[in-house]
């Protein structure tokens, strides 16, 4: 997965995102460059920093979708954050460094999952032993050999039953995990690690939580977490996760246009927006942020910023920040043909989703080819007449089309519901004719 070629990356994205080839290519190259960089001498590596990307495109054209699919495919630590949610350091709210902490937490999740998978058997054994020990009457210390043998025999019998899930309904008392999580927002970075150690001391590190009676089935889930913590080397996990963040992390910074201060707007400069931009600079440029994994260096984290830039322009960002996003891609707005393809082509496309949902009720949903074309046509018309909300318009149109059958589906088990062009015209055509109605209904 790490060394996919740009073409392979694009081919994968093509399965989910229609069109937007420039954006796909740019991102694919940025990722490949990271791989290329890894092959260089350490000295050279230091000098090659990632080229961050700015995606410009109106709402609903696939900006977030591209990033989301990409991260899923690459199994890289990825977070999507809204730039407009942050506040300047020193003011109440989330400071921008917290995005790196969130990214670190994501990486830890990925690493832990992979290690859990590698140690699947060990973990399963731990859980099994723990539960069976609780279910059997305890063997007193210094028991005779015969008692020991009997105990072992019943243990083995329990193991068989456990494997078949025959014990799942029994009740068992187990120690609940201690929750050591505390909100870390708003704390100065240096405090986070201090806070962690304090929690460990006060919460009694390694101490057991309160006992609670649960079913064996539930106990399995609760103990899985404990097993992972007991059996895996936490420090090693943290180290792996730190490396993963530093070398492969991606931050998708949505809505950057909202922190740009429009030069044409009536209201005077908003200082807090500019403050957020200034706080972003060092992080994007490369600095060190304290996280639960220890200090994380952001030099090689890839930032993908995205925004519609309707009211502001990329040039309304402070110049230093503009310079740190040298790769610009514009996403095309969607035409009728693209909308039609989005409706039908992607894996789990909208059409397939509705068909699957109604199949649950035993109703077969069929869309005639002409009907699909009509849906795309009216979606585009609605976008042109009111706001252009891109592919999201397909969702509102589709909802309108299936609302009736969706409501009554359970009474139509075994039937086929055919969506024809005439039906679309009847349901949507009249609405689109009237601009005011379109505003409210679609
Ligand atoms: N090119 C496309 N191919 C396939 N699906 C798309 C495409 N563009 C948009 N969609 C669908 O439309 C929805 C919205 O897309 P997305 O979240 O990517 O919008 P966006 O460009 O990030 O908009 P915003 O600026 O509002 O965040 C998604 O559910 C996605 O599946
Ligand atoms: Mg988006």
Image (tube, grey):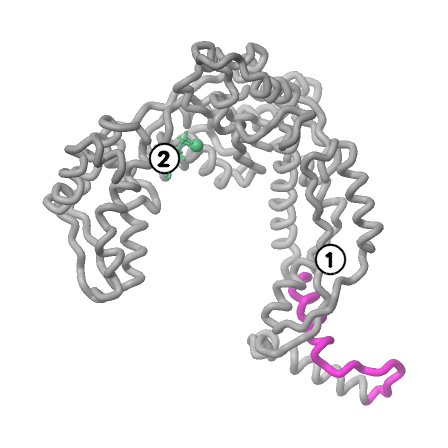
Position of residue 405 measured from the top left corner of the image (x, y, whole percent): 22, 56
Range of residues picked out in magenta: 122-146
Residue sitting at 44 percent across and 13 percent down? 265
Q: Which residue is mark 1?
A: 178
How many residues crowd around disc 2 within 10 Å: few (fewer than 14), some, or many (20 or more)?
many
Give the image quarter of residue 343: top left
Position of residue 398 measured from the top left corner of the image (x, y, whole percent): 26, 44
The residue mark sitting in front, 2 or 1, is 1
Residue sitting at 65 percent across and 33 percent down? 98
Q: Is residue 155 left or right of residue 355?
A: right
Q: Which residue is mark 2?
A: 17
Q: Is residue 24 visible?
A: yes
Give the image quarter of residue 283: top right
Q: Is residue 217 left or right of residue 407?
A: right
Badge 2 residue CB within 8 Å of ligand 1: yes
Badge 1 residue CB within 8 Å of ligand 2: no
Residue 124 counted in the magenta span: yes
Q: Nearer the N terminus, badge 2 or badge 1?
A: 2
Position of residue 418 measured from the top left corner of the image (x, y, whole percent): 16, 53
Q: Is residue 58 above or below residue 16?
A: above
Residue 126 counted in the magenta span: yes
Q: Helix, strand or loop at disc 2?
A: loop
Residue 98: which disc?
A: none
Q: Helix, strand or loop at disc 1?
A: loop
Position of residue 192 measured from the top left corner of the image (x, y, whole percent): 75, 37
Give the image quarter of residue 164: bottom right
Q: Is residue 246 visible?
A: no
Q: Is residue 23 above or below residue 340?
A: above
Seen from the viewer's position, the closer of residues 369 and 180 is 180
Seen from the viewer's position, the closer of residues 378 and 332 is 378
Quadrant observed for ligand 1 in the rendered image: top left
């Amino acid at each position: 997965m790490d060394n996919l070629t740009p073409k392979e990356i694009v081919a994968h994205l093509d399965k989910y995102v229609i069109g937007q080839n420039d954006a796909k290519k740019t991102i694919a190259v940025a990722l490949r460059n990271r791989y290329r960089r890894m092959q260089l001498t350490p000295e050279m590596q230091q000098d090659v920093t990632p080229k961050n990307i700015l995606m410009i495109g109106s709402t609903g054209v696939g900006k977030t979708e591209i990033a989301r699919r990409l991260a899923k495919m690459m199994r890289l630590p990825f977070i999507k954050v809204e730039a407009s949610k942050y506040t300047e350091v020193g003011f109440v709210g989330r400071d921008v460094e917290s995005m790196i902490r969130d990214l670190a937490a994501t990486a830890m999740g990925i690493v832990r999952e992979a290690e859990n998978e590698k140690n699947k058997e060990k973990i399963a054994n731990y859980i099994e032993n723990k539960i069976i020990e609780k279910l059997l009457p305890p063997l007193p210390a210094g028991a005779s050999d015969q008692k020991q043998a009997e105990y072992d025999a019943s243990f083995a019998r329990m193991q068989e039953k456990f494997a078949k899930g025959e014990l799942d309904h029994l009740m068992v008392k187990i120690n609940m995990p201690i929750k050591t999580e505390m909100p870390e927002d708003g704390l100065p970075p240096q405090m986070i690690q201090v806070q962690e150690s304090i929690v460990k001391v006060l919460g009694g590190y390694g101490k057991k939580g309160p006992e609670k009676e649960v079913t064996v089935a539930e106990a399995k889930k609760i103990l899985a977490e404990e097993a992972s913590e007991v059996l895996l080397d936490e420090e090693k996990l943290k180290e792996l996760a730190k490396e993963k963040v530093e070398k492969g992390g991606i931050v998708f910074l949505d809505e950057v246009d909202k922190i740009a201060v429009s030069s044409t707007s009536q209201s005077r400069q908003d200082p807090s927006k500019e403050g957020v931009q200034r706080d972003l600079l060092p992080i994007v440029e490369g600095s060190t942020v304290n996280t639960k994994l220890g200090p994380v260096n952001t030099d090689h984290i890839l930032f993908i910023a995205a925004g519609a830039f309707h009211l502001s322009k990329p040039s309304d960002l402070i110049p230093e920040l503009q310079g740190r996003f040298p790769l610009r891609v514009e996403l095309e707005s969607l035409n009728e043909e693209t909308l039609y393809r989005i409706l039908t082509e992607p894996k789990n496309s909208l059409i397939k989703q509705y068909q699957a949902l109604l199949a649950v009720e035993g109703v077969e949903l069929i869309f005639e080819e002409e009907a699909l074309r009509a849906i795309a046509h009216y979606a585009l018309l609605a976008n042109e007449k009111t706001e252009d909300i891109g592919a999201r318009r397909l969702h509102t149109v589709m909802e309108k089309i299936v609302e009736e059958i969706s409501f009554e589906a359970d009474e139509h088990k075994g039937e086929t519901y055919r969506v024809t062009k005439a039906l679309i015209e009847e349901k949507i055509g009249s609405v689109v004719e009237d601009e005011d109605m379109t505003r409210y209904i679609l």
